[in-house]
């Protein structure tokens, strides 16, 4: 690396936190550039040149620009983790990792992430539907973690990083984590990893424990 990676982020975004957390876990130097989503900075021409969809996060690694949080995880693991720990090379484990990345982009986004957005940003969407989706997802995740420490294989992978932020902050969307002992134990394992950095908390009157 000739210069720190530039991370365009929004501090309250779980998608952006995925990228920031993984950069920290890898020990990679980076410069955080805050994008004011409330002011619409992500829709301005300068930002749209980085990501035509107008979303954070985006990283700039020299001349390379990568948008989308899961794509960023794959890129960073492929380029900077020479051990293959974070993105397993075994075909089955690679497929299982991709499966959970898809869950992070699908059920996690329309469940706990959306429930949090509705409360935190007063989005005019169906909160009960998002909570129902979240509890269904967490039931599957909790069952999967029975007898496991991580989602894929025997160690942490980018699947865990993709799932962590919005799961940990689900109570901010009114989704309680208390019923899911396996998820809560898994969250503690992620938080104990060297280099872990938390996402800023957004306490709300409606938050669940």
Image (tube, helix red, strand yellow):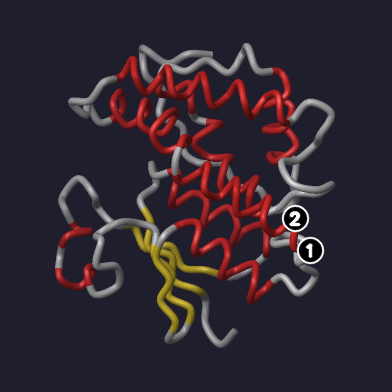
- Measured along the vertical axis of the image, is residue 163 above or below residue 124? below
- Residue count near mark 1 (Cα–Cα under 10 Å), binned few <14, some 14–19, many ≥20: few
Please identify the quarter of the rendering in which residue 24 is found.
bottom right
- Measured along the vertical axis of the image, is residue 87 above or below residue 182? below
Q: Secondary structure at mark 1?
A: loop
- Say if mark 2 contacts mark 1, CB within 8 Å: yes
The residue sitting at 60% across, 57% down in the picture is 22
- Residue count near mark 2 (Cα–Cα under 10 Å), binned few <14, some 14–19, many ≥20: some
Q: Secondary structure at mark 2?
A: helix
Q: Which mark is residue 90?
A: 1
Mark-to-mark CA distance, 2 and 1: 5 Å
The residue sitting at 56% across, 87% down in the picture is 2
- Of residues 151 and 95, the one nearer the viewer is 95
The residue sitting at 39% across, 44% down in the picture is 13
Where does residue 72 sit, x and y in percent of width and height?
50, 64
Q: Which mark is residue 161?
A: none
Count the labels in the image: 2
Please identify the quarter of the rendering in which residue 168 is found.
top right
Where does residue 89 sit, x and y in percent of width and height?
76, 67
Please identify the quarter of the rendering in which residue 113 is found.
top left
Quadrant for the C terminus in the image: top right
Where does residue 95 sit, x and y in percent of width and height?
67, 56
Quadrant for the N terminus in the image: bottom right
- Measured along the vertical axis of the image, is residue 77 above or below residue 114? below
Where does residue 74 sit, x and y in percent of width and height?
58, 65
- Of residues 38 and 161, the one nearer the viewer is 161
Q: Which mark is residue 93?
A: 2
Q: Is residue 123 left or right of 83 when viewed as pictured?
A: left
């Amino acid at each position: 690396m000739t210069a720190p990676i530039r991370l365009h982020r929004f501090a309250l975004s779980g998608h952006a936190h995925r990228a920031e957390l993984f950069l920290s876990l890898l020990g990679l130097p980076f410069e955080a550039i805050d994008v004011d989503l409330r002011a619409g900075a992500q829709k301005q021409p300068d930002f749209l040149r980085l990501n035509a969809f107008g979303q954070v996060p985006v990283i700039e690694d020299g001349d390379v620009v990568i948008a989308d949080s899961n794509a960023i995880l794959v890129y960073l693991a492929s380029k900077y983790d020479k051990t293959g720990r974070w993105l397993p090379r075994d075909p089955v484990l690679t497929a299982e990792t991709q499966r959970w990345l898809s869950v992070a982009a699908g059920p996690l986004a329309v469940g706990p992430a959306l429930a949090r957005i509705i409360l935190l940003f007063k989005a005019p969407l169906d909160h009960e539907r998002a909570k129902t989706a979240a509890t269904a997802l967490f039931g599957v995740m909790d069952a999967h973690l029975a007898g496991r420490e991580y989602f894929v294989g025997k160690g942490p992978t980018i699947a865990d990083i993709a799932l962590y932020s919005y799961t940990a902050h689900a109570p901010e969307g009114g989704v309680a984590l208390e019923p899911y002992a396996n998820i809560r134990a898994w969250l503690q394992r992620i938080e104990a990893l060297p280099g872990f950095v938390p996402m800023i908390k957004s306490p709300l009157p409606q938050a669940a424990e």
